[in-house]
Each structure stands twice: as structure tokens, then as C-alpha cells.
Image: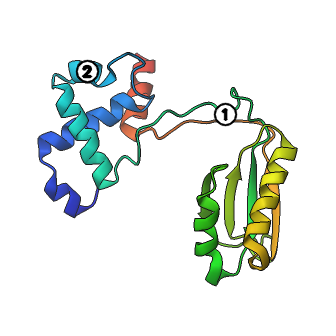
């Protein structure tokens, strides 16, 4: 948290926000009123929980509150990381265009690793199979036109780990719990 943001959050609010992050790292409780359940655990009101989440969203600590579906279980098994070699002066603009596409889940700029790796823009494309992903990547290539120098698609072969953010404090606590 930046010093400017920290100065606007009281110590009590900061402590509540920290506890909320710890309690929701596995997701919101799957109950009809999740904010009420969190409030009960923290001995605050549901309104205080909702206000804390609003504050964290406004400050950028929390980007969004949303369902995160398991795309493999939904049948999207042809997920591929498309990699793009775009002139450096055009890469931000191209990234914004690609990032706005509904079949791209995340898109980011990375430094090239020349001479072996010319790609500087990465975009994860989801499809039910490899052909569907190749079709989507071809759409991106058409959209970018002459800005594309080279591109490729890297398909994963195995999921080794997939989780959201976990704070170090929570990991340490879990290790301590396991040792007892």
C-alpha cells in the first residue's frame, strides 16, 4: 500500500481490510449472504465489510469481486498463450486492442530475450480446442495487420498449479497449523 493510501486508511480499517483479505483468499463463502458471514466472523457489520471492499477497490488493493470459473471444467481445454513480436512503439496500443477482446483473459508486455525470443506481447486465448484457439489468434493477427512481425501460440500440456493470490501471512499460518 502506498504511503498516500495508508495515510487515508485508519489503523482499524487497515486491520479489517487485512483480515478480509486473509478470510477471502480461497474465495467468498458460498452462502446466500457472504458479507454477513464474514461480518459475523470479524465481529463487525455487513455494511462495514462492504465498505471495506469498496475502499479496497477504490485504492486498487482489490481489482474486482467476481466469480472465477474453472475453464477446464467448462470445456475450454485448448487454451493457448499467443506471443507477438510487435514494434516497441506500437506494442501498448496493440496490447490495449487485444486486451479488449472477450476471448483474451490476460494480456501483458514482456521484454524480448534476443536473439532467441523476439516476442514482446503475450495474450492468453481460450477455446474449446486448439483449432478454436488458432481461429481466435488468426483474428488477432488480422486485426493487428502489418504491426505483427511474428507470432506463435504456446499450448499448455499440464496444469501444475493454479491459485489466486495468497498472502505470506496466510501461508505461514497454514504451515504452522500443519505442524501442530
Determine the residue positioned at 76% across, 76% down.
114
* Among the two numbered marks 1 and 2 on one chain, the one whose residue lies closer to the N terminus: 2
Q: Secondary structure at mark 2?
A: helix
Whole-percent x and y of residue 113?
Answer: 72, 72
Question: Which residue occupies the foreground of this view, 2 or 138?
Answer: 138
Disc 2 target residue:
36
Q: Disc 1 and disc 2: Cα gap in Å?
A: 29 Å
| Residue occupying the point 79% across, 66% down | 141
For the view shown, which residue lies furthest in the bottom direction?
A: 89
Q: Which residue is at 68% across, 61% downward?
A: 122
Would residue 109 be seen by someone viewing this image from the given angle?
no
- When the figure is inspected, residue 148 is found, relative to residue 10, above or below; the finding is below
The residue at which mark 1 appears reads as 71
Residue 18 picture location, percent across and down: 27, 39
- Report if the CB atoms under discs 1 and 2 are less than 8 Å apart: no
**Res 138 visible:** yes
Amino acid at each position: 500500500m502506498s504511503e498516500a493510501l495508508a495515510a487515508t486508511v485508519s489503523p482499524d480499517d487497515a486491520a479489517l481490510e487485512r483480515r478480509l483479505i486473509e478470510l477471502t483468499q480461497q474465495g467468498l463463502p458460498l452462502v446466500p449472504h457472504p458479507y454477513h458471514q464474514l461480518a459475523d466472523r470479524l465481529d463487525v457489520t455487513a455494511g462495514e465489510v462492504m465498505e471495506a471492499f469498496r475502499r479496497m477497490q477504490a485504492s486498487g488493493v482489490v481489482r474486482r469481486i467476481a466469480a472465477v470459473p474453472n475453464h477446464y471444467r467448462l470445456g475450454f481445454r485448448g487454451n493457448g498463450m499467443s506471443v507477438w513480436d510487435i514494434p516497441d512503439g506500437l506494442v501498448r496500443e496493440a496490447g490495449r486492442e487485444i486486451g479488449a477482446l472477450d476471448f483474451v483473459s490476460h494480456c501483458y508486455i514482456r521484454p524480448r530475450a534476443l536473439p532467441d525470443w523476439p516476442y514482446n506481447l503475450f495474450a492468453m486465448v481460450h477455446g474449446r480446442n486448439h483449432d478454436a484457439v488458432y481461429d481466435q489468434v488468426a483474428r488477432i493477427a488480422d486485426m493487428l495487420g502489418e504491426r505483427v512481425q511474428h507470432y506463435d501460440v504456446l499450448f499448455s500440456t499440464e496444469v501444475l498449479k493454479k491459485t489466486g493470490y495468497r498472502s505470506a501471512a496466510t501461508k505461514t499460518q497454514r504451515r504452522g497449523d500443519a505442524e501442530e
